[in-house]
Every structure is written in C-alpha cells, then in structure tokens.
Amino acid sequence: MTAAPAVTGSVAVVDPYASDATASGIRFLHRLNPLSKVAAVLPAMIMLIFVRDLVTPLCFIVLSYALILVGARIRTRTAVLLFLAVPLGMLAIGLGFSLWVDAAGVEHTAPFLQIGGWTLFTGALQVGFATALRLAAILALALIGGLTTTGPDLVRASIQQLHVPYRIGYTALAAYRFVPRFGYELSVIRAAHRVRGHGTGGMWGGRGPFARLARGWGYIVPLLAGAIRHAERVALAMDARAFGAHPTRTERHLVPFRTRDIVFIAAFLAVSAAILVITFPWHP
C-alpha cells in the first residue's frame, strides 16, 4: 500500500520512504518477494556455468527477456540497454573470445575467415559465442530481479525471511547509499569550481588529460570532507534511533513471502529443468 501524500500548505509532500506505487496486475514481478526472484534464477545461473552449447543459454535469454517484458515496468533507457547494448556487447565478446581460441583444437572444423596464413575456424566462433551467450544469459537472469527489486526491499526481505542480523543488513544499505550521495556531492563541487572559474585559465586550463587530472585532484579534498560530514550525520541518526541496542527491531515496512512467490519459484524451476533436459548435451 502506498502512503498518501501529506499536504503542507499548498504543496503535497510524498513520503520518500513509503512503498513504491502499486504496479498493475500484469507487472507481477514487482509484487514478488525479492528472495523469490533470487531463489528462482540461481539454479539456472549455476547450471549455465557448465554448459558449452549455444541453444541452452539462448533459451534462457529468451525466457528472461519474455519475463521482463511481461512482468516488469521498463523505461526507454532500459529498453535500449536490453535490446541494443546487450546484443552489441554479446557480439563483441563473442568475436573477442573467438580470436583467443587455440586453433589447434578447432582446426578440424571448416574455416570461416582466412587472412594470409591466419585462419579463423567455425569451431572457434562456436566456442567464442557460446561463452558470450552464457554471460548474456546469466546477466539476463540477474536482471529479472535487478530491474524489479529495490535495495531496501532486498535488505528487509533478508532480515525478515533469512533472519540476517539487522545490524549487518542496514549497515550495508547505509554504505550502499553513500554511492549516489558521492555523485551528488561531486556535481555540487564541480559546479562550485566552475562558478569560481577554476580550470578556465593557467597551465591546467585546457581540455587535455593533464587538465582533467589536475581538476580531479582538486575535487578530492572537498569530496572527502563532504563524505566525512555525511558519515557523521548518518552515525548520529543511527545512534538517535538506538541502532544496535536491541537484538531485533520493529519493521515499518513488511515484505511478506506469499503463495505467489512459491508458485513463481516452482514454475520457473520447472521451465528451467525442461530447458536443460531438452537442450543440454548430456551425451558428448
């Protein structure tokens, strides 16, 4: 349930710690427990480490993309990543691995490309693209949960279902949230330097690598000072809330493990087993 916005004067203020907006019924991945999405894809990711054919990882890529398209809310940037960046990266990795394959082990296959005395065999291409497809399949399976799960929900689920000590879970979450904070601090420091005209003149005022290095060195001290101030504020806030004083804490937001999560895990494991039985080369 999404918390209602609080009205302050004429401005509606939305609680930043409230649950995400309720997804439509068809976008079911957002409604699942984060741990169920991890438990469902983990066996397939482990099995993909041992496969060497092309069909098995390709089937898992198709399955993952179908689930993401049907069950997740994706933005234009994410769609470009899925359908343009990932295929191009897979093509580049496949060609790169093909060039590193020992020709002595695939010289019995048909030649694909010859340049002088150098030959690229079809067996090398098969090995290279099989490796690239395995990596792409593992990435696609990880995106099922990665695109539909927030960090706080994963931490809450780990504490509530896996009984991870909250001291570890919320400390890790606080450390993870330092990363976007550093990005914001860096943008503020850069803007302040531009306002003061730093880097626009002198021997380091150009756009070359030495100028970039000099400007980057000038960001270190104020960035460290901002990080220390932020760490002190976080420590004071945790102390004010008696963090670590008791073995357990009351959770404001619950992340339950429902029947739908069990059904999703069972269905995904069944489909994964069917793919492995049909496509995996059990007999060399």
Image (cartoon, rainbow, N blue to C red):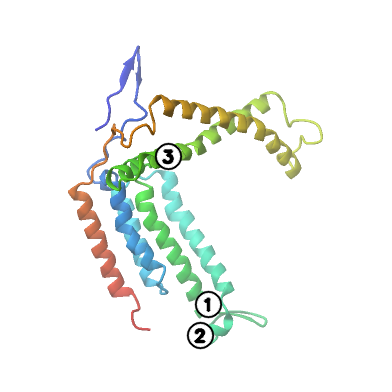
Please tell me how crowded label 3 is: few (under 14), some (14-19), or many (20+) other residues with Cα within 10 Å.
some
Q: Is residue 114 left or right of residue 132?
A: right
Considering every residue shown, the one lying at the far top of the view is: 9
- Residue 72 appears at what percent x and percent y? 32, 47
Secondary structure of residue under mark 1: helix
Q: Earlier in the sequence, mark 1 or mark 2?
A: 2
Q: Label 2 neighbourhood size at 10 Å, few (<14), some (14-19), many (20+)?
A: few
Tags 1 and 2 touching, CB below 8 Å:
yes
User: Where is the N terminus found, in terms of image quarters?
Assistant: top left
Front residue (pair 27, 169): 169
Of 89 and 222, nearer the camera is 222
**Mark sitting earlier along the chain (1/3):** 1
Residue at 37% of width from left, 62% of height from top?
45
Q: Amino acid at mark 1?
A: Ala
Q: Is residue 70 visible?
A: no
Residue type at numbered disc 3? Leu
Where residue 270 sits, quadrant-wise, is bottom left
Residue on which disc 1 sits: 124
In the image, residue 80 sits, relative to residue 10, either above or below, namely below
Q: Residue furthest right?
A: 203
Residue 45 horizontal side relative to residue 258, left or right: right
Q: Which residue is mark 2?
A: 109
